[in-house]
Image: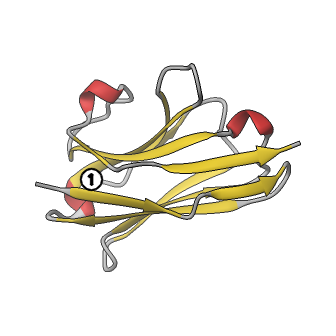
Amino acid sequence: QVQLVESGGGLVQAGGSLRLSCAASGGRVSMYTMGWFRQAPGKEREFVTRITGSGGSTYYADSVKGRFTISRDNAKNTVYLQMNSLKPEDTAVYYCAAAPGWAFTTTPSGYNYWGQGTQVTVSS
């Protein structure tokens, strides 16, 4: 059973940056496809980015491409989401999730394990 704990959320002004962390236990992040999703009030959970376990291939939603970067530190068993040039529309609860390492999925149903989420608020 993989446990995921997100941290690093907070309040930031538009144009600012934040780095989210997702610390894993009970499994190695290098063996899973690790994804970041977000959910704004009244909206469905949406895909942000993912990095595959095998090969470390990354993929981003168009809305964050060029601004957000996902990375993985195998030694710390942690996945990061570096968010730059933040916009008010990036405001949401951000969730870390894990799927089988071979998965290229971008849908929430493809992920087996979820963290509790961390709030990101971007003020204009």
Residue 108 left/right relative to 17: left
Residue at (21, 47) in percent of width and height: 101
Considering every residue shown, the one lying at the far bottom of the view is: 75
State the quadrant of the C terminus.
top right
Residue at 31% across, 72% down: 74
What colour-coding does the image apply? secondary structure
In the visual, does 88 lie left or right of 31?
right
Where residue 112 sits in the image (x, y, percent)?
Answer: 20, 38
Q: Amino acid at mark 1?
A: Gly
Task: Judge whether 112 appears above or below 96 on screen.
Answer: above
Question: Which corner quadrant of the image does residue 8 belong to?
Answer: bottom right
Image spot of residue 4 (x, y percent): 30, 57
Q: Nearer the viewer, residue 114 or 56?
A: 114
Near mark 1 (Cα within 10 A), the count class, few <14, some 14-19 or many ≥20, is many
Residue 120 at what x, y percent from top left? 63, 49
- Which residue in the structure is indicated by mark 1? 53
Quarter of the image for residue 93 reads top right
Q: Write the residue at 26% across / 36% down.
A: 111
